[in-house]
Amino acid sequence: MAKFLRPYRLKLITQIRSYISRRWYSYLFYALGEIVLVVIGILIAVQINGMNEARKQKEDEIESLSEILTGLQNTWEEVILALEQEKRWRACNYAILEHLDNQRPYDPELDQCFGCYYWSPTVQLSTSAYDQLKIRGLELISNTELRNAITHMFDSQFDVLKSEIETWDSQLLSSTIYPMHTRLFRKYYPEGWQVFEDEFAKPVDYEELLQNDTYKNILSEIISLRNYGITTNTALKADLEVLIAAIEEELETLRTG
């Protein structure tokens, strides 16, 4: 009987093994399929996240560059105004010095020059956008050459200008020029004068002023400083124009790329 059943038993065992094997392979393929789908899903999510991050970074870069551009344009306008003022006040310095050196009689037409010969233009530097960029990270500017140019402008050229303004105000103007000015001149305001216009002043003793070599030397020193200021501001104006054009070009590339 056992011999009779043996073929059937072997056949049954073979069928069971075959069934189990097929089921195992099915489960294996199913598991592998699930893994592949999960990996593909992760890769797609990573790619989408990367694209969103790149888009966000690009938007942040455009925003930062736009703000820096506006600040530089405002500074450029300040430099233009400073150059105009510097040249006008330098003309006053020359007029007073020429008048005194040639011992000419007092001329009321010089009162406006006497009132503002020592003035110095102050360039309001717009740096808030750059300060914000440094907090966010300078690497936000993807163009390395442009990033270096922006850094040089704000951290080098602007710092030099600040230092020169501070030196004029704290060392020369407050300690030397203004004390002498208040001793030699009396300020007044003609009819129709408005705030922010050049002031007017009359010499307290014009004859004394004609002989005052210290005052004449101070005028010469102011003229020298104005010449230097005009030269440096002219160079700064040109550098600002180059940088402004470079940022405008980069913004156009970022917006259309």
Image: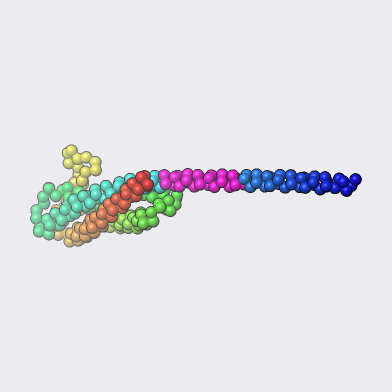
Q: Does the magenta portion include 44?
A: yes
Q: Does the magenta portion include 82?
A: no
Q: In the figure, is residue 80 to the left or right of 158?
A: left
What residue is shown at x 32% (from left), y 48% (from top)?
Answer: 248
What residue is shown at x 15% (from left), y 56% (from top)?
Answer: 94
Q: How is the image coloured?
A: rainbow
How many numbered marks are there?
0
Q: In the figure, is residue 108 to the left or right of 3?
A: left
Residue 38, picture quadrant:
top right
Viewer can see residue 114: no
Q: Which residue is most to the front?
A: 4
Rendered location of residue 101, percent (x, y): 12, 59
Rendered location of residue 127, percent (x, y): 36, 49
Viewer can see residue 41: yes
Q: Name the main secondary structure of what is drawn in magenta.
A: helix
Q: In the figure, is residue 208 to the left or right of 164?
A: left
Tell me the quadrant of the picture where the N terminus can be found. top right
Q: Which residue is most to the right?
A: 1
Rendered location of residue 158, percent (x, y): 33, 55
Range covered by the magenta-colored residues? 35-60
